Every structure is written in structure tokens, then in C-alpha cells.
Amino acid sequence: MDTMRLRGLRHRILIAVELIQPTPAPLAETGAKALQLADLQQQLSDRAQSSLGRARVMALVPSDNLAWIEEQQQRTAEIRRLVAGGGGFDFRGIFDPTEVLDKARIEGSALEPAELLAVLQLAERVEAWRQTVLAPPAAVLGKWPGMEELSAPLLPHDLANLLRFLRGKIEADGSLSDDASPELRRIRRAMERQHRAIEDSLRRALAKLSDGGSTQDELITVRGDRFVIPVKAEFKRKVGGVIHGSSSSGQTVFIEPMETIEQNNELVRLLDEEQAEVHRILVAMTRAVAAQDGALLLGAGILAEADAHQAIARFAEDLACVRPAFATTSSGSNLDFELLAARHPLLELHLRAQDTKIVPLTIALPIGTRQMIVSGPNTGGKTVALKTAGLLTLMAQAGIPVPAERARLPLFTAIYADIGDAQSIEQNLSTFSSHIVNVDRISRAADDSSLVLLDELGSATDPEEGAALAVAVAEHFLRQRAWCLITTHLTSLKVYAAKHDGVLNAAVGFDEAKLAPTYELRLGVPGASAGLNIAARLGLDPEIVANARSQMSSQTVDIGHFLDELHAQLSAATTERQTLAEVQKKLDAERLKLATEGRIEQKARTRELEGKLEMLIKDFELQLRDTVKAIDDKTVAQKISRDSALRIARLRREFSEQFQSTVVAHTTGADKNDAPRVVNKQREPQAGDTVRLKSLGREGRVSRVIDVKTLEVMVGAMKMRVPRSDISEVVTVAKDNSTQSARKRGGVTVSTATGSDDAEYMTSEINVIGKTADEAESDVERFVERAFLAGLPRIRIVHGVGMGVLRRTLREFLNKHPHVASVTEPPYNEGGQGATLVELRQ
């Protein structure tokens, strides 16, 4: 028994570790009570489906272990992806099985059917989760490494056999099903038959006795697992049998007739057999559960964690939360502390219930700034800003997404909060005294990795002394480099913030026209308290308000007016900036629309002109061929045909280049906004030079010098061949040449011969291996035409060796082609008989 107790103790320790794992490196202090962390956890736990999931959420505490925080954030993000995709998992039925498994491990013990039913439901959930991890839904397939890592220890444990053994054996009412075993089914069938036999026998006995008036009622009842009949007390001696008690009045006795005694004995024997079989089945089922105790404990722990993450994910989805980043390493941001459009989650849920929207606030501290002084009117949201920053920081370091558009926070080791009424009756301390005691404790503990939240610092005492004390406290925390948010009405603290580096003023908004707070937080400016305005709005006697205003010093009044005007100017500037941004957005959209329409129209016009040019050239070719056919002398006709084909090809290329040049010059404006130029008319153009073309009146860049009479020139994005005589001058560009200008503005590439979208690239080799002679000849003819138009000096045709049919056919065709200057066979190492080199006419 001692061994069993030790095993039970070991498993209870295991459950504490696995089911509700403690948070590593918890913060030294969290200010959780003042920041209502428990209320937030309750909201989260309400979204969990199991008691274990709720317990896991309530056990969460903020940590300064970045690896653990990122792990929690990652797992929640993965489950959130599943939830957002319309998926999820049913965690209902998850419970802590520690006690049940402790009982199951006792040799010969039998769990109650209800306990086995609960274990069966847990096992089904564990196995379903295991299968989900092995075959994830499409929404998270390959996208949830965190949950896979969490569930990895469970994957080797297959609970399918346990489920098959337990399923179908326990009814919903906790009894064993007849299908629990063949023997139990046999026994229960025999019991049914015995019941019927006993009932038949007793009915016959009742029929005899009822005729003589001896029975009290014509019914059969049970006493002590034996069937009996009710008989009037005065007739009990007339009925032979065993008496099994009487009614409370004594007028009726319950008798088991002699003829049914053996039948009842048989039924009792069958009942004993049933109980023995039920016990045997329960013991067997208990042993099967005990054999999988480790998997069940492990699975319950993993599912508790997963249920907690699903609860947090649903909360994050509901409140549009984001995963926070931590300013532990440089990320290019100029902010170390940023909560953009942040919302207090509890306040937002409360306002939603009232069908009211919350006003987001932004808290941002640039690098080097460690303090923010928040001022402004009462009921304006200063304390809400403080609590929002504190609670969202706690959420982030507890691994919970935060309700904001963007969040970047330092990694704190402690969060100290002095918020609200700190009066202590038990310690006989006033509000001011309690605040001072708390601030003193914080000042001794806070360091450069602490967040300090101080509400209404220096209040509840003489204003002059309170102001001096507040400034001294703020300076202390500034020297300690503690992160510090302070709310105040004191002008001295606003002045302190303006004069000290590393301190930022901020103000909650107040609408002077409506005399109501806007709940917005404005960074960089102090706020006016507006106490008298608020008092007037709340209905205080106007005479009292006027008297109070007369008591204020002129300096205080001037400061108040100045701050009011400053906030009015800021509001106007914000509105104007938003209006300008909207106008600019519309202008950008219209500009993009016009540019797109212009490009479409230009392309359509270019294609139209290109088609017309091609049709003119084809008409000219047809007319020339008809003229050649009319010549009777075949020798002359062949010579004219060959010369005309060469001339037509050259004209086609020249027309194409001129057409392309015209389009480029028209669309790129390559001669506009060029840098200052120095003209050199004497030097011969070389590759890389910028030259001016007579024919176009435009500049281009020399790509290469083909020969002394011909150059290859780039105009915009178009490459063309031009004669040396077309160069009017060589231009040296001081900063940026015209081609670069054209490329910056965008160019148009046109090809009239091939229809290709890429006129700058033309391969010099074609492979026709595997094609028939006719197919190869057709492909080579088109390739030669394109190469000639592109200005290539030579091409290479790969046809393979084979039987030599392709080689002979193609070389005969090429020798007769008007664009071909010569046909040669390359050296062995460059293809030999398997290729042909073709020099093109220039």
C-alpha cells in the first residue's frame, strides 16, 4: 500500500507539471490588482470549453522570459489561424484524471461506470487531437509548428485500442450494456426468461387467491430481490409460502408462494452471476485505463494548454488583437514603446454591451524617452490611458495578443502601479500617506527594466508641496532610467516635462464647444485641467463658478487659454492633414488611371500602324513577284528575284527600324530634361558614346561599332542599326545621358517582323534535331529572316549528323537564300557535321 501511495504522489506531482505548467521567470511585481488582470483572465477563461482550459488561463502570469512569451504568442497565433478559418476543436469533456487514474492503478480495483465514461470521453478527445496534429486542417497545414512541438510527446501514444475496448459498453445512465461481453448478454437473457416464468407463476397464484378474496391487490411486487404477492393479513395462513414482510398498516403481508421459491432462487443466482460478470468487466476496463495512464495524463495536459490558447485566440479575434513585438533588438524603429490605436479590453467589452464604441489611444515613446506626463481634464481618460498601457503590457508578457493596431514594447522585469484611492483604514493611513508609502517602495525597487505607473502624483495634499514632491519623484525615476507614465493636474510637472530630455508631455482631449472630453491622447503637448469648465457643465451654481474664476491668477488663466488654443490648432491641423491625405489619394488614383489609359491607347495605335506597315510591304512583295513571273528569261528572272528579295529584306529592316525609332522618340521624350552636354564633333563614335541622329533629331547610345560605316545604337529601349552618315554629333553627358533619362521615364519596344515582345534579344542558334526536312526548312527560313532583321552577322544551325538528310536539305536551301553570304561547316569541337555556320549579308 505504501508503494501505491508513492506512485499516486508521483503522478499528482506529474499532473501539476503537465496539466498546469508554471510560468517561467514571472515578473517580480505586476500591479495586477490595480490593472485588473484577474478580470481580464476571467473574460478569457469564459471562452475556454473545459475546466482545465479555464484553470490554465487563470494560472497565466506575466513573464520576462522572451522565449516563453514568443512560444505562447506563436501557439495562440496558430490556433487563431484555425479559428479564423472557420475551424476549431471540441475541448468539452476534458478533466483532471489524476484521482481516477490513481484509483485505476490499484491492483484489482474497479472504476465506477460513470468514471469510466468520463475517461472514455477524455480518451476520445485526446485521440482526436492526436489525429488532428497528424493530419492538420487545410487552414493550418504546415503552419503550426508551435502546436506540433507542444503535441509531439503525445504522438507515439495510440489510444485506438483503449477506445475500441471502452466504447459501446457503458450506457448513458451509467449501467453496463448487454454488449459489454457475450457472457453478460447470456446471463441477462436467462434473467429475462426467469422473470417471465416467475411472473406467469405468480399471476396464476393471484388468480386463485383473488377468487376467494384473499389478496389485497392483484399485482406482483418485489421484496429483497424476490418476487412476491400481497395477501390480506387474515388469509396469510391459507397461502403456502414464505412471508417477506408486511405493509406499514399491518393489513397486508407479502408472500412468496411455494411454487415460485425455486424460480426465485434461480433468479437470485443469475443476479449474482450478473454482478460478478459486471465486476469482472469493470476490472478489465480499469486495467486497460491504467495501462494508458501516462498517455491520458499527458493528453489532458496538452489539451488544457490548447484549450487555453483557443480561448485566447477567440478573444483576440473578437477584439482584433495583434501580436506584440519586443524592443530587445534593433529593428529600424525609432520607438521603443509604442501602442498604436490601443484599446482597454475590459472597457471596450463594457462599452460594446452598451452599444458604444471605444476611442483608441496611441502611446509612443521615441528612443531615449523614458517618461510621459499625461495631463488634462478630469473624466478625460488619463487613468484609462495609464491602465491601458499597464494592462496591455501585462497581456503581452503573459503571451496574450493585445487590442491595438501595432504594439512594440520593452521587455520589463517588473511593473509597479500606484493607481486609485490608496486609503488604508487598517493601517490608519490617509490617501496621501498610503500613496507616499507605495511610491517609496516603488522608488527603492524600480530600475531601468521596470515600468512605473503613477496616477495623480502629488495630489491629496497642499498643492505647492505636492507639486515639489511630484517633480522630485519624477526626477528620481528619470535618473533611474525607469519607464514611467505619470498622470497629473500639476502645472509644475507639465513644465518639468518640457524642460527635461527624455520626458514627453501628453494630453487627453477636451471639446471646449461641447464641454466634454474626447478621450483622445495627444502626444507632445500638455493638457489643461478644465476643472471650472467641467464644473459648469455639471451644473454648479454659475455664481460659484464665476467667483472661482476671479480667484485664479492671471498667469494661470493665460496658461489655460494658451493650452486651449494650442489644442484647437492641433485639432484643425489634424483635420486639414486628413483632408489633404484624402485629396492626394484621389489625385494619385486619377493620375494612375490616366497613365494606364494612355499606355493602352498608345499600344493600340502602335499595333494599328505596325499592321498597316506590314500590309504595305506584303503588297509590294506580291506586286514585285508578279512582275518577275512575267519575265520570260529564266536566268534574268532568277537574278531579279534574288536581288529583289535582298532589297525587300533590307527595306523591311530599314522601315522597321525607322518605325521603331519614331515610336521610341515619340513615347520616351528622350531629349527632354537631359543634363548639360559638351559637344564633340571631331571624335569618331565608339561604344558607350551618346550620339545625335539626324533622321530622328534624337540622342542614342552606341551599343557597338559594326564596321566603319555602320553603328548599332540604342534609342530609349530600342536597338537599331544606323549608317555612320546619320550621326550629326558625338555628345558627352556630364551627369545623366538621354538613354538613361528615357529608361527612367519608361520606353516602348516594338517588333514588326516577328511579333515578339523582346526586340533587344535575339539568339544566334536554332536547333532542328528531330524535325522533318520540310519542318526544319520552314523553321530555318523564319529564323534567318529574324536574324537578318535583327542585324546578326552570323548564326548557327544545329541539325545533328544522322543520315545527313537534314544537313544536305538545309545547306542547299541556305546556299540559295538571298540573305546568306556563305555556308560553312564548323570545326569538330564546335559540332562538325552536326551543325552549320551561316554568315549573313550586312
Image (tube, rainbow, N blue to C red):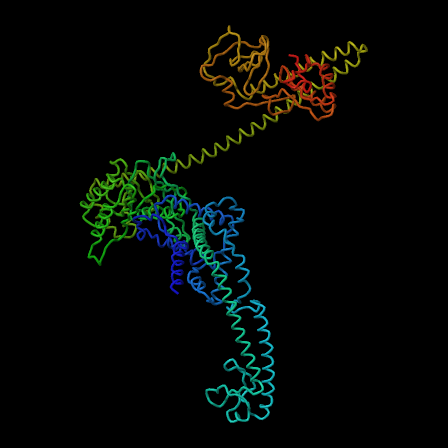
705 w.r.t. 180: above or below? above
Q: Locate residue 536, reporting x and y percent.
A: 28, 50
311 w.r.t. 739: above or below? below
Position of 490 with respect to 348 (left or right) is: left
| Quadrant in which the N terminus is drawn | bottom left
Residue found 25% across the figure and 40% down from its top: 480
Position of 658 with respect to 329 (left or right) is: right
Quadrant hosting residue 794: top right
Q: Nearer the viewer, residue 705 or 70?
A: 70
Q: Nearer the viewer, residue 730 or 378?
A: 730
Number of marks drawn: 0
Residue found 56% across the figure and 86% down from its top: 218
Residue found 55% across the figure and 10% down from its top: 727
Name, please, the residue furthest toward the top. 682
Q: Locate residue 635, reporting x and y percent.
A: 78, 10
Q: Nearer the viewer, residue 462 or 150?
A: 150
| Quadrant in which the C terminus is drawn | top right
Q: Locate residue 293, reporting x and y percent.
A: 46, 58
Q: Locate residue 270, reporting x and y percent.
A: 55, 76
Quadrant hosting residue 641: top right
